Image: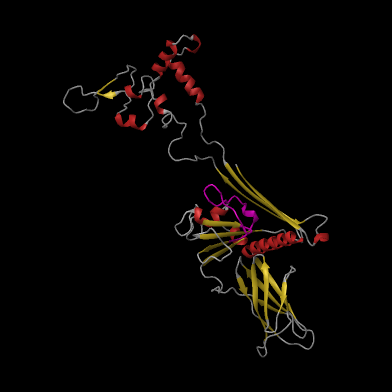
């Protein structure tokens, strides 16, 4: 029993570690004395506002692991040295942010040294093209979905194809969990934008922690509530009423599904008996005006053999009426006009778009009321979106 419990705990620990590796980043560097360049041992490096930190070793090196993506300030302190603050340190998904720190000795308490971190152009731990999109950047984009955001990036199509591949060859992960439709392997992108903290897109050079991927990885990390305050975001989009299709409406009388039943040229006598042009002067050429009103209704609409090939064959309402009159049940007797009226009633929906579209995206988070301070700054973040 004890052995089974140990195996279960080890499996859970391995799973949690694997998930964390795909949704967090790290900060590493070396702490040195600015006077002589020698490493400084035992320096405390803390991420402001968090419990994450590290201490420098005998070589002055330090590493802070499992940092959620975002922008942080580093507080550096050691006995005999002036405190240092490094502001604006950017941590990205699955990447290492290098921050080397220089410290000045002091005999008495002095002023704090503030340094602003600089983003390096070349990222040493990236072997392929990788793009990180932060929540602050997403706010400025003309987009209301994850698909819209990603399609604005170079090399990504509106269907989330990367480098010319299909979306079924892309791995989309949310907080380390793959989200894909098991039927066709396509990514599921219904996550609200208000819940997104950062999006990372990587093409090629995938690490061993990723599997079942060929063209690219889309890694999404969601937001966490602020332990000190409540935040609320809302975004919306309004679109006037407009068709959701190309060409005429499928409910139009000339649509493919309705025309054989409603076009006077063929609706009564059938598509195989429609009006045809006739060579009245027998010269082998059908001239303008040479036609025959074969069904005698005064309509001169022309259905040639090409029209007949494009539409479903229909026997005509006259034949439908004759069939109802031929049986022994007088209750279903119909005239041709009555038969067509019943058809129109059964297909009476107009299908035209009259209502506008609304897209709403809301997010709300912060400390859990009443119990947050008792449970280690317990916090929450809830989001949702609605399209109607």
Q: In the rendered image, is residue 184 in sight?
A: yes
Report which quarter residue 149 is drawn in.
Answer: bottom right
Image quarter of the N terminus = bottom right
Q: Is residue 21 above or below residue 340?
A: below
Identify the main secondary structure in magenta.
loop
Q: Which residue is at a point 80% across and 58% down the rendered structure image?
A: 372
Which residue shows up at 63% across the image and 69% down it? Answer: 90
Coloring applied to the structure: secondary structure
| Residue 246 left/right relative to 91 | left
**Image height check: is 262 above or below 194?**
above
User: Going 44% across and 11% down the picture, which residue do you hit?
Assistant: 327
Please report the bounds of the magenta region as a residue range: 174-199
**Quadrant housing residue 375:** bottom right
Magenta span includes 177: yes
Quadrant the C terminus occupies: top right
Query: What is the x, y in percent for residue 364?
Result: 71, 53
Instruction: Compare residues 24 and 304 and report the one nearer the observer.
Output: 24
Question: As drawn, which residue projects farthest toward the bottom?
Answer: 36
Residues 273 and 240: in front is 273
Q: Is residue 350 left or right of residue 265?
A: right
Task: From the top left corner, tell me how far across and down residue 307 is, in percent.
Answer: 33, 30
Residue 272 image-quadrant placement: top left
């Amino acid at each position: 029993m004890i052995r089974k419990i140990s195996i279960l705990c080890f499996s859970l620990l391995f799973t949690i570690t694997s998930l964390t590796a795909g949704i967090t980043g790290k900060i590493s560097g070396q702490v040195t004395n600015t006077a002589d360049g020698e490493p400084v041992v035992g320096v405390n490096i803390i991420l402001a506002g968090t419990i994450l930190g590290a201490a420098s070793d005998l070589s002055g090196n330090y590493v802070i692991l499992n940092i959620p993506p975002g922008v942080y300030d580093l507080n550096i302190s050691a006995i005999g040295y002036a405190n240092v603050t490094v502001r604006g340190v950017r941590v990205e998904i699955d990447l290492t942010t290098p921050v080397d720190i220089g410290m000045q000795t002091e005999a008495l308490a002095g002023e704090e040294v503030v340094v602003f971190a600089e983003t390096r152009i070349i990222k040493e731990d990236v072997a392929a093209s990788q793009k990180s999109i932060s929540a602050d950047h997403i706010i400025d984009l003309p987009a209301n979905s994850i698909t819209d955001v990603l399609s604005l990036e170079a090399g990504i199509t509106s269907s989330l194809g990367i480098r010319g591949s299909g979306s079924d060859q892309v791995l989309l992960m949310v907080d380390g969990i793959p989200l894909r439709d098991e039927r066709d392997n396509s990514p599921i992108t219904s996550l609200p934008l208000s819940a997104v903290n950062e999006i990372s897109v990587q093409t090629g050079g995938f690490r061993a922690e990723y599997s079942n991927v060929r063209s690219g990885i889309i890694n999404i990390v969601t937001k966490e509530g602020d332990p000190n305050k409540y935040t609320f975001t809302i975004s919306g989009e309004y679109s006037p009423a407009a068709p959701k299709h190309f060409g005429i409406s499928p409910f139009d009388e000339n649509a493919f599904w309705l025309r054989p039943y409603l076009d006077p040229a063929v609706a009564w006598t059938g598509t195989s008996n429609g009006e045809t042009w006739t060579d009245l002067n027998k010269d082998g050429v059908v001239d303008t005006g040479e036609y025959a009103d074969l069904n005698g209704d005064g309509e001169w609409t022309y259905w040639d053999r090409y029209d007949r090939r494009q539409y479903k064959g229909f026997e005509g309402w006259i034949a439908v009426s004759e069939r109802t009159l031929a049986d022994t049940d007088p209750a279903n007797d119909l005239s041709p006009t009555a038969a067509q009226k019943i058809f129109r009633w059964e297909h009476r929906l107009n299908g035209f778009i009259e209502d506008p579209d609304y897209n709403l995206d809301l997010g709300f988070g912060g400390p859990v009321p009443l119990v947050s301070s008792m449970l280690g700054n317990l916090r929450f973040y809830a989001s949702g979106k609605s399209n109607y």
